[in-house]
Amino acid sequence: MAEQHANKTLEFFFDFGSPNAYFAYERLPGVLERTGARLVWRPMLLGAVFKATRNQSPALIECAPKREYLWQDMQRFVDRYDIDFQRNDAFPINTLPLMRGAIAYLGTPNFEPYVSAIFHALWADNRNLGDSHELKSTLTEAGLDIANFEAQIEDSTTKQALNDATAAAVSLGIFGAPSFIVDGELFFGQDRLDFVERALTEG
């Protein structure tokens, strides 16, 4: 998903652990093509966002019927937009190393192959990326250097960059993923992409 030159900028705040962020990722190419918007990736650590904003993962909702309904509602979007999707049996997982990887690769040629590999491994292939062997296998299949990845995610600069990116997201009013900002206006949820697209074409 290449960034495009455009009149307006679309900021995409995401964490791989959100299935709805994956849906947004799958739908964004169409939005960018129709609007000509320039995409700016905003990786963040969703668990830290939840903690800072006193929000919680839908996986932790105590109302069992609501939890099941949310999965059923996701399936409606899967069917409507023809998204390759499987519910991940390991959900939720700790995405800290995955998001450190996103921060480390941001702005490099490895970023988009990495993002594609991680999103699809989690939400199309039902792979448990909380397992180090599965993660290494996924990275290898994507043509990424495992030793480099491991060095990057343990680097203090990478760790601080993710902390800073997450704090910046919270300061902008982000409380969950996926979130989008257009012209300073916040939109939450992949089900709000119609509003995002309208904002990108207004004016």
Image: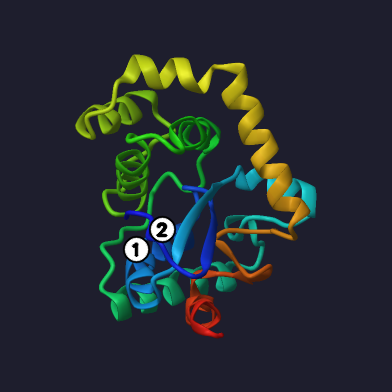
Q: Position of residue 53 (x, y in %)?
A: 78, 54
State yes or no: discs 2 and 1 in contact (Cβ < 8 Å): yes
Front position in the image: 113 or 60: 113
Q: Secondary structure at mark 2?
A: helix
Q: Is residue 182 above or below residue 21?
A: below
Q: Position of residue 24 (x, y in %)?
A: 43, 65
Residue position for label 2: 22
Q: What colour scheme was applied to this rendering of the protein?
A: rainbow
**27 with respect to 140 (left or right):** right
Q: Quadrant of the N terminus?
A: bottom left
Q: Is residue 114 above or below residue 70?
A: above
CA neighbours of label 2 inside 10 A, class few (<14), some (14 to 19), many (20+): many
Front position in the image: 7 or 72: 7
Residue position for label 1: 26
Q: Position of residue 192 (x, y in %)?
A: 53, 77
**Which label belongs to residue 85?**
none
**124 with respect to 56 (left or right):** left
Q: Residue at x 40, y 61 (%)?
A: 5
Q: For residue 179, what is the image quadrant?
A: bottom right
Mark 1 residue type: Glu
- CA gap between label 2 and label 1 equals 6 Å
Q: Is residue 174 above or below residue 198?
A: above
Q: Secondary structure at mark 1?
A: helix
Q: Is residue 41 above or below residue 94?
A: below
Mark 2 residue type: Tyr
**What is the number of callouts on the image?**
2
Q: Residue at x 35, y 30 (%)?
A: 135
Q: For residue 67, what is the image quadrant?
A: bottom right
